[in-house]
Image (cartoon, rainbow, N blue to C red):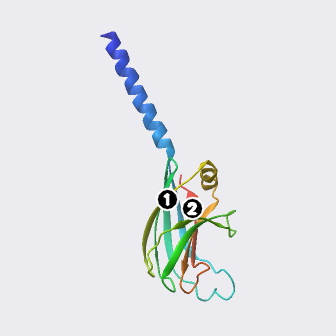
Amino acid sequence: MVFNRVVAVTCAALMVAALVVVGAQRQGFQGRLSPLPVDARTAGTITGEGVVRAELNGTELTIRGSFEGMSSAAIGAHVHRAQPGTPGPVAFAIDVPTVVEGEFEDIVTLDESELRELRGGFYYLQIHTENNPGGELRGWLWPQE
């Protein structure tokens, strides 16, 4: 009887510990997609807004978002890597519909270096459009509390 209690308590403790570890692996990120001119020529042609949310589960990052009011249809989206507030190179391509307003979802798998960069605020999402192939909307993926 005492043995059964010890086993039951041990099993319950292991289940709680497993839930804590799994919960610790999940982390949320979010950002606001805003018009950001690439140069003076495009400053007057960039419009729109949106949101981006991401959930990290282990090494898989699920990125979801929506956008509206852009000057033309989306032609692609990328997650870029850079210091906050500066432009940077493409890290991952993200599938978006070819529309002026819509929603998107994509999943990327990150390695250890990319996980550190994500958690450090080094990634932003940029949506490229027909009128502004250099980028129309941009939003940093900030960790959620």
Q: Residue at x 46, y 72 (%)?
A: 96
| 7 on left or right of 40 | left
Provide residue 8's location: percent of width, then percent of height: 34, 21
The crowding category of the residue bearing disc 2, from other C-alpha atoms within 10 Å (few below 14, some 14 to 19, many at least 20), is many
Q: Residue at x 68, y 63 (%)?
A: 82
| 14 on left or right of 81 | left
Provide residue 62's location: percent of width, then percent of height: 47, 58
Label number found at residue 141: 2
Quarter of the image for the N terminus: give it. top left
Q: Secondary structure at mark 2?
A: loop
Amino acid of disc 1: Ala
Task: Give the quarter of the image for residue 104.
Answer: bottom left
Q: Residue at x 46, y 63 (%)?
A: 106
Provide residue 30's location: percent of width, then percent of height: 52, 61
Check the image and report above or below for 54 versus 136.
Answer: above
Q: Which residue in the structure is indicated by mark 1?
A: 54
Q: Nearer the viewer, residue 71 or 89?
A: 89
Q: Earlier in the sequence, mark 2 or mark 1?
A: 1
Q: Residue at x 37, y 16 (%)?
A: 6
Amino acid of disc 2: Leu
Check contact, mark 2 vs mark 1: CB within 8 A.
yes
Q: How many marks?
A: 2
Residue at the outermost top position: 2
